[in-house]
Structure formats: C-alpha cells, structure tokens
Image: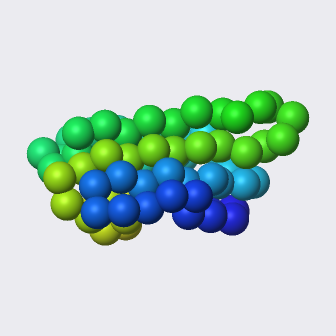
Amino acid sequence: MQIQIMKSDAKEANLSILEADVGTLYVIQHELLKTKNVDFAGVVMKHPLTNEIWMRINSKDSPIKNAVEATNSAIKSVDNLKKLLNSKIK
C-alpha cells in the first residue's frame, strides 16, 4: 500500500492510496465517522483499473492524526473479531 498526501491543512486532508483494498478503507472510514471531531470522511475508487483510491477527511482538528487513530482503532476491532472467530472454531 502506498499513501500520498495530495492536500493537507488544519481541517482537511486528501489522500491518494495505491494498491489497497477498498474494504479496509471502508473500515477506517467507519471508525473516522464515529469520532466527534470528524465532520466528513469519504472513500472513492478513482477507477477500478488504476487501483487508486481517494480518501478525504474533514475534521475540527488534525485530520491526519484522526486517520492514524481511526486506523489503530480498526486494527483493534479486527483483532478482536479474529480472536472471537478463533475461539468459536476451536
């Protein structure tokens, strides 16, 4: 996965993400939208053949910081799901 910041300021960040799974980014978007500081978080596939995904985050404070926190929260949620599934399989 390659991430490039296309535009960033105190309240908005636009990211270009290459070679990523859009489903993963939807989980991060969901975590962002649960945050009270985030006004908008959107994920758009630029084109299926280019494998480029754009993400925009508007927030009251640092959007990049919010993205990092949402990513960490998504990792924890998926890890909890993995543990639950493993416990049911055994």
Instruction: Tell me residue 14's x, y (percent).
Output: 50, 51
Check the image and name the residue furthest to the right.
49
Instruction: Tell me residue 63's x, y (percent).
Output: 32, 59
Of residues 48 and 78, which is closer to you in this image? 48
Q: Residue at x 44, y 36 (%)?
A: 42
Question: How many numbered dots are placed on residues in this image?
Answer: 0
Q: Residue at x 75, y 54 (%)?
A: 19
Instruction: Tell me residue 28's x, y (percent).
Output: 41, 48
Q: How is the image coloured?
A: rainbow
Q: In screen coordinates, is 58 left or right of 14? A: left
Is residue 3 visible in the rendered image? The answer is yes
Is residue 75 visible in the rendered image? The answer is no
Check the image and name the residue furthest to the left.
36
Image vertical order of residue 88 relative to residue 7, above or below: above
Q: Residue at x 44, y 61 (%)?
A: 8
Q: Residue at x 69, y 62 (%)?
A: 1
Q: In screen coordinates, is 20 left or right of 72? A: right
Image vertical order of residue 18 relative to residue 65, above or below: above
